[in-house]
Amino acid sequence: MAELTERESGELGRLLQKVSAAVTEVMAPEQVYVCLWSHAGGVPGHIHFVVQPVGRRDMARFDAFGPALQVAMGGAGCFPDAAEVEQVCERLRQALA
């Protein structure tokens, strides 16, 4: 992140806000986590963001929040099926258009 230009960081901020707003509109979560992950194989090398809708039900189910919730959900194999992902993606495409 420190190596981004002012223009790049401005564009990134606007993009994260727009995507977070679309996720909020489409998923109606209690909160949207926006997390930066930048390690590939334990070595800093790239940037990507996780934009994750979160509700109390998931926090209670996994007894976790924040990054620990993401780890717990992944460790439990808690992933949506492909059809569900495609439905949400289509709604997000419309919200972002």
Image (cartoon, rainbow, N blue to C red):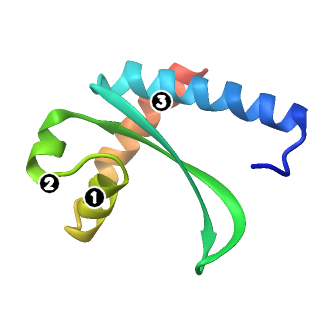
Quadrant where the C terminus sits is: top right
Of helix, strand and loop, which one carries label 3?
helix
**Mark 1 vs mark 2, CA separation in Å:** 14 Å
Q: Residue at x 43, y 28 (%)?
A: 23
| Location of residue 61 in the rendering, given as x and y in whole percent from the top left corner | 9, 49
- Of labels 2 and 3, earlier in sequence is 2
**Mark 3 vs mark 1, CA separation in Å:** 18 Å
Q: Residue at x 69, y 70 (%)?
A: 44
Q: Quadrant of residue 62?
A: bottom left
Q: Which of pointers 2 and 3 indicates the residue nearer the eye?
A: 2
Label total for image: 3
Q: Which of pointers 3 and 1 indicates the residue nearer the eye?
A: 1
Which residue, given by chain and number where applicable, does mark 1 sit on? 79
- State the mark number for residue 45: none
Q: Quadrant of residue 60?
A: top left
| Location of residue 92 in the rendering, given as x and y in whole percent from the top left corner | 47, 30
